[in-house]
Image: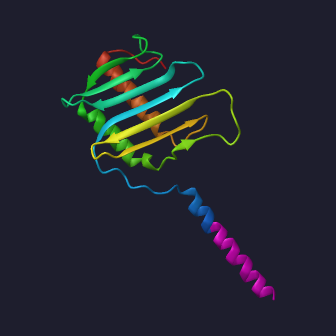
Amino acid sequence: MKQILLIAVIVIVLLGLMACKGSKNVAQNPVPKGQLVKFHYAEYGTMAQPNFEYTLQRQPDGKVTLCVFRPWVEEGWGDTITTTAAVLTRVEKMIKDNNLQNYKSHYSPDVEVLDGYSWGYEAEFDDSVTISSGGSNAGPGDRTLDVIGQYLDTCYAQVKGIKLQR
């Protein structure tokens, strides 16, 4: 009887471990196959204006534009520059290499927070695939979107010939 009980406990523990392992992995969505044509990422605090906002987009004429709003942008609500297709390609690579298509559709904290921030991103590809995610006072465990934002800050600053104020 002890052996049967021991085997049952081992089976239950193994099934539990397998279930835990599976729950850590978000559903594995396929990496988008198309080329990135538009990327938008923003974070909003409790005030009306965003903490930051980026829109990177391939225009119908083939040019790539980057619209940036950051507190350090002198133009106020933002400024749009023309950049290179390489910037769009690099952001696409970061999205695909870091599997942003596997982010949850929405993140929220376990407890209600009445003050804080919200964020969201959307990436559109030329094959009509769109991936997006957002949240309120919670987000994914990685920092990929922050890295993309820092990269876009640097691209903007280089084109404008300004020094970043962080």
| Percent coordinates x, y for residue 79 in the rendering | 35, 17
Q: Nearer the viewer, residue 159 or 115?
A: 115
| Percent coordinates x, y for residue 61 in the rendering | 18, 29
Q: Which residues are drawn in magenta?
A: 1-17
Identity of the residue furthest to the front in this view? 128
Instruction: Reply yes or no: does residue 135 show up in magenta.
Output: no
Identity of the residue furthest to the right in this view? 1
| Percent coordinates x, y for residue 142 in the rendering | 52, 43
Asked which quadrant contains residue 67, the reply is top left
Residue at position x 41%, y 37% in the image: 122
Left or right side of 136 for 68: left
Residue at position x 54%, y 42% in the image: 106
Above or below residue 129? Residue 40 is: above
For the N terminus, the image quarter is bottom right
Provide the major secondary structure of the magenta segment.
helix
Left or right side of 156 for 53: right
Residue at position x 68%, y 29% in the image: 114
Asked which quadrant contains residue 92, the reply is top left
